[in-house]
Amino acid sequence: MKYTVFLFMVLLFFCSCEDFLTEEPETEVTNNNFWKTEKDLEVGVNGMYKIFRFNHGNNVSVHLRDRGLVFDGLGTWAKPSNNDLSGAWGQSSCTHWEMDYQVIMNANLVLDNISRAEGVDPVRYRFYEGQALALRAYMYFYILRHWGDVPLILHVEDVGEKARTPWQEVAEFCISDLKQAASMLPVATEMKDSDGNPITSKLFISRGTCHAILAHLYAWKAALNKEPGLNKTAILYCDSVISDHSYALAGNVKEVCEVVIKGNSPEGIFEADYEDTEYDLKSWGSYVAGYCQFWPIVPGTTPASARRGLTIMNKTVYALYPDEKDQRREEYFYKLDSMARVATSITKGNAYPRKYRHTLLYTSGSSIGKMRAYEDNEIIIRLADIILLRAELKNKTGDTGGAIADLNLIRERAGCSPYSGEVDGDLANAIQDERDREFFCEGVSIRYFDIVRNGMFRERLRGNFKTLTDQDVADGALFVPVGELAFSDNTLMRQTPYWKRNGFDN
């Protein structure tokens, strides 16, 4: 039985986008023999999450798509951060959505076969169905924020040529699935596995996770589809998450680094959670931190060691964190003030990020003592995110006092002075500044999505972003182009208009 489960998961894991769009499914016999008991459903859902951890959490392309990083030295990110996607980047896996759709196909696999199980308690049945509905919705929300219009595939056997569905329709589909999932799932502190044991991993989606994703989804649709009335709906979902006793802010910034980033804390809402096993652990180079954190985190490095790809200058850090009392200066960066006084021949004028601190080293073999992985989770959504999102939404709906109160909650935890318009500027920018500070080196394209949602791309992003016209934006300039594999054996696929004008011919 274990081999059978592994077989059909592997078949989906290694199928390409063009495979599942054009070929008949190969798992019918396996599915007929497998989905019988609650344990089978649990194994199927766990397999779905394993694909998610690998294809989404451990996929460096997910981070390479991020065009909103605040670093000065950008390395591989230099051209995309200028919205110049020509050359090698445009032909790389960054424009391909196959691995994202593999997660969706595994969710579809669960949803298409869950009804085969017999004698499963209805509450438990809904639990597994809710997991698959919610993860599929999250993945579609992730994909539509990067590509805009995307193929909508709802069943494993939904094969053949596929056109792109307008992103607004996909968003409505996600909203429907998330609402249904939320009605099926308990709050985070009441999650249990098939044996009745508590589920403490924030990988598994709870009612609060659904509401957090819905808050972001409504905020996105309100902004990009010019439906400002949806901001109030998004606030209601933020309220639900913030009032959920499953969640609580960490007490200070050190605790954010030591506890929240490590994972599965009361502040965490949705995370890619990894186990220290041969086939599950996330490689340290698949974190953004793997590109910017070296000394003193990585063994064998010194202050003069060359950085791998992302650098941030001391002056940029001071501009980002102007309040001298801001604890994030010293917690997110190693001895910021004292290292800023070290000779630039050693530091090159750059700061030393250290937000991710829990490391695993090789204990045997030729690499003994060297860096093997971070022990930290990939934090996708945490409570501070939802509080600052609510501040943003309250400001947009005219509740200035409520927006300032939410903003100050995060500022005060960091040791900063309360918001002052004279010092911090207009409230919308102050909230975005706080998000930039709080989620430095964290999340999945979080800053880029923030800036697009708030229409600040000309002011806060670089290069070609600054000269985009309204027509460019309407034609999809803020999305990434569709990769060439999506056009293989698919005459219905069309390129995003802006990128078709800018060198992507498909």
Image: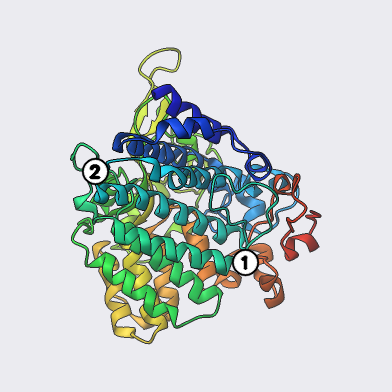
Give the left or right position of residue 222, taking residue 333 as reference. right
Q: Position of residue 127 (x, y in %)?
A: 30, 50
Residues under labels 2 and 1: Cα distance?
36 Å
Question: Circle 2 — which element?
Answer: loop
Q: Where is residue 267 in the image (x, y as percent from the top left)?
A: 26, 55
Q: In the image, what residue occupies the spot 43% across and 40% down?
A: 48
Dot 2: few (<14), some (14–19), or many (≥20) neighbours within 10 Å? some
Query: Which mark sits nearer the N-terminus, 2 or 1?
Result: 1
Q: In the image, what residue occupies the spot 52% across and 39% down?
A: 307
- Which residue has dot 1 on it? 166
Front residue (pair 369, 114):
114
The answer to whether one can see residue 283 in this image is no
Q: In the image, what residue occupies the spot 30% across and 47% down?
A: 125
Q: Which residue lies furthest to the bottom in this view?
A: 398
Q: Where is residue 304 in the image (x, y as percent from the top left)?
A: 48, 36
22 relative to 246, above or below:
above
Front residue (pair 53, 405):
53
- Which residue has dot 2 on it? 199
User: Where on the picture, by quarter, is residue 439?
Assistant: bottom left
Quadrant of the image for the N terminus? top left
